[in-house]
């Protein structure tokens, strides 16, 4: 059983790296942003509520977010562990996760923070495209698709996220970086925080994250 938490500012590369680590470690990638975007597409009650916060660059309230995440973790495929991307985002979420894992004699094994300078975060989000079908992530500069406007993996059209408009990008960074620092401190105090320089290539950052985790023993509690 292994529980990894990927931390980083909006645009740091959490989703990109979570997809790579998920494949290499063979454990599911769970992203609260993806869960919220799916809920928005489905126009569910959670989606309609979350949208009001997402379009302003604000965090969705803890109560809604924690409940949604715990429901996802209760699914069978999360039994051997998960890579969490975008959760926890507040100290209250971190405590809720610790409590839920402790009920299963588990804990967050590694919290990996990807660090990227502010202006590079803005550049990355401004050039981001995601595929309509599965949310696969591209960048017009650093990670372009093979065919313009189409996903390499499922051929669905590439779209810009609603919250990747210039004004929302700045708002997200202004509103969310303080909470990120608090969550990093939470894991530092528990001795599981590792920081990785996110300015390298996607492959380099993936290698550094895997090195920070060290050998992974699957199936051990
Ligand atoms: P969420 O979807 O989690 O967005 P985020 O944290 O703002 O993170 P991003 O998805 O923007 O960035 P990322 O770090 O995954 O970077 P990516 O890999 O895409 O959340 C969206 C919203 O939902 C939040 O604002 C909030 O409202 C709500 N929400 C979600 N979780 C919540 C929670 N727990 N509590 C409350 N509210 C919550 O990469 C970015 C770009 O850079 C891409 O184009 C990529 O191709 C490129 N790139 C990646 N790595 C590199 C590299 N090494 N070099 C060059 N380019 C790179």
Image (cartoon, rainbow, N blue to C red):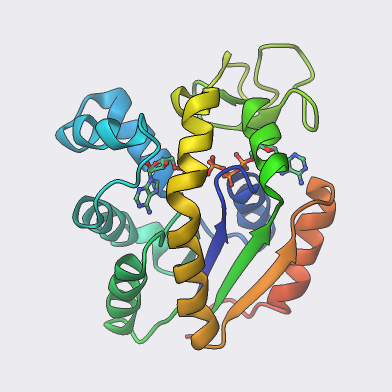
Comparing 157 with 159, the one in front is 159
Q: Position of residue 75 (x, y in %)?
A: 31, 57
Q: Is residue 60 left or right of residue 190?
A: left
Q: Is residue 70 left or right of residue 158?
A: left
Query: How many numbered circles does the render carry?
Result: 0
Question: What residue appears at the point 36 percent right and 70 percent down from the top-left corner?
Answer: 91
Question: What residue appears at the point 73 percent right and 65 percent down from the top-left corner?
Answer: 196
Asked if residue 198 shows in the view, the reply is yes
Q: Position of residue 100 (x, y in %)?
A: 28, 75
Q: Position of residue 37 (x, y in %)?
A: 37, 33
Please say if 160 is above or below 15: above
Comparing 124 with 143, the one in front is 124
Asked if residue 29 shows in the view, the reply is no
Question: What residue appears at the point 27 percent right and 61 percent down from the top-left corner?
Answer: 70
Q: Residue furthest left?
A: 45
Comparing 181 with 69, the one in front is 181
Please say if 199 is above or below 95: above
């Amino acid at each position: 059983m292994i529980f990894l938490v990927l931390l980083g500012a909006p645009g740091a590369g959490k989703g990109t790296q979570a997809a790579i680590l998920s494949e290499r470690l063979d454990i599911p990638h769970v992203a609260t942003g993806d869960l919220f975007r799916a809920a928005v597409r489905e126009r569910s009650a959670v989606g309609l509520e979350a949208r009001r916060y997402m379009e302003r660059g604000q965090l969705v309230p803890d109560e809604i977010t924690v409940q949604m995440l715990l429901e996802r973790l209760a699914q069978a495929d999360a039994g051997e562990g998960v890579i969490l991307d975008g959760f926890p985002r507040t100290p209250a979420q971190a405590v809720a996760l610790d409590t839920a894992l402790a009920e299963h004699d588990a804990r967050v094994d590694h919290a990996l923070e990807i660090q990227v300078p502010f202006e590079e975060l803005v550049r990355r989000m401004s050039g981001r495209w995601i595929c309509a079908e599965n949310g696969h992530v591209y960048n017009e500069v650093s990670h372009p698709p093979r065919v313009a406007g189409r996903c390499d993996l499922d051929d669905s059209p590439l779209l810009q996220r609603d919250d990747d408009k210039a004004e929302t990008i700045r708002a997200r960074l202004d509103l969310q970086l303080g909470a990120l620092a608090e969550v990093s401190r939470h894991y530092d105090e528990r001795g599981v925080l590792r920081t990785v320089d996110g300015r390298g290539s996607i492959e380099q950052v993936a290698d550094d994250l895997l090195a920070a985790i060290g050998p992974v023993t699957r199936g051990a509690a």
